[in-house]
Image (tube, rainbow, N blue to C red):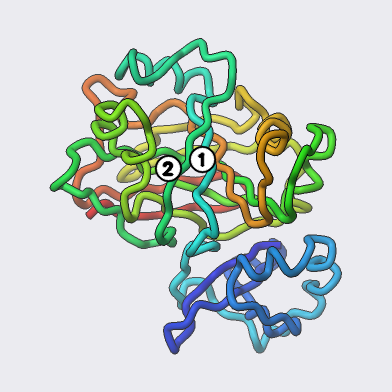
Amino acid sequence: MKLYTYQSSDKTNRIGIGFSEKPGYLWPAESFGLSFSDMNDLITSLTLPELLRTVSIENASDTEAINLNRIRLMAPIPHPSQDILCLGINYAAHAEESARFHKDAFIVNQEKAVYFSKRVHTASGYGDPIPLHENLTDSVDYEAELAVVLGKDAKNVTAADASDYIFGYTVINDVSARDLQTDHKQWYFGKSLDGFTPMGPCIVTADAIAFPPVLDICSRVNGEVRQNSSTGLLIHSIDAIIAELSAGMTLKAGTIIATGTPAGAGMGFTPPRFLKKGDVVECKVENIGILRNVAE
């Protein structure tokens, strides 16, 4: 099942539900007797098993189907209830290119997971611009990532039970201002400027993807493949991440965890290939979809 947030004709955000058997369409949540203020409300109100029992493709009427090409897709969670939790340096090849770019800011042989958070005022949706913030930075970069969305509060979760807490998966472009990231000797500011969290196009529910997810992940800039890898190459696995973080803090339902980016980010090239005005960035994760945004 795919869950969308889309803008209706009266400019309000609504939740839509799609099915792999009928690609290119969604159905308003109300078609299945569901009414929620937003995706956070849905996730905190319904467990994934409850949602799956309530919604089925057999109850999806063709007369209520909406063509995805005729609506504006928002980020599936336009306003995350907390900062997004992020993994840094979680693919070996990306660790190497990061150290080449700035050896003091990035550590190659880091034994423990590198965590940071990303402030998100409003997550950007499919087709929304990536602002270049030219008054602040000259080195805006892209990072395609698989993100995990938790479906219930997690505290002291074992790695063996971690998958039970996952509601679904989405795609995030962890846009980064590399000069701010390195100059400040921490990553929060350079990762958190407005418009630096494109997300989408949807959340795919956890039942649709085998755990642990081994999915192709890639990014393209103006059609050129920049990143091309697999989530099976994560250094720190999703179950280990959830177990470690929940041992020290309560992870609330709706928490978003971005699992890191593979090699091929703009800073990995010589010279670096940062985004320029008009660049079209596409981040894709297998079985989830393509997230497309334009640098402006």
Q: Which mark is residue 145?
A: 1
Question: Does residue 214 appear anywhere in the picture?
Answer: no
- Under circle 2, the secondary element is loop
- Seen at 54% across and 63% down, the residue is 76
x%, y% of residue 14? 55, 78
- Seen at 58% across and 51% down, the residue is 170
Q: Residues within 10 Å of mark 2 (few under 14, many from 20)?
A: many
Amino acid, disc 1: Glu
Amino acid, disc 2: Asp
- Seen at 68% across and 82% down, the residue is 35
Examine the rendered structure and indicate whether residue 150 appears above or below residue 43. above
**Could you say which is closer to the camera, residue 9 or residue 34?**
34
Examine the rendered structure and indicate whether residue 223 appears above or below residue 153. above
- Under circle 1, the secondary element is strand
x%, y% of residue 62? 69, 84
Q: Dividing the image into 4 quarters, which one contains the N terminus? A: bottom right
- Seen at 70% across and 38% down, the residue is 246
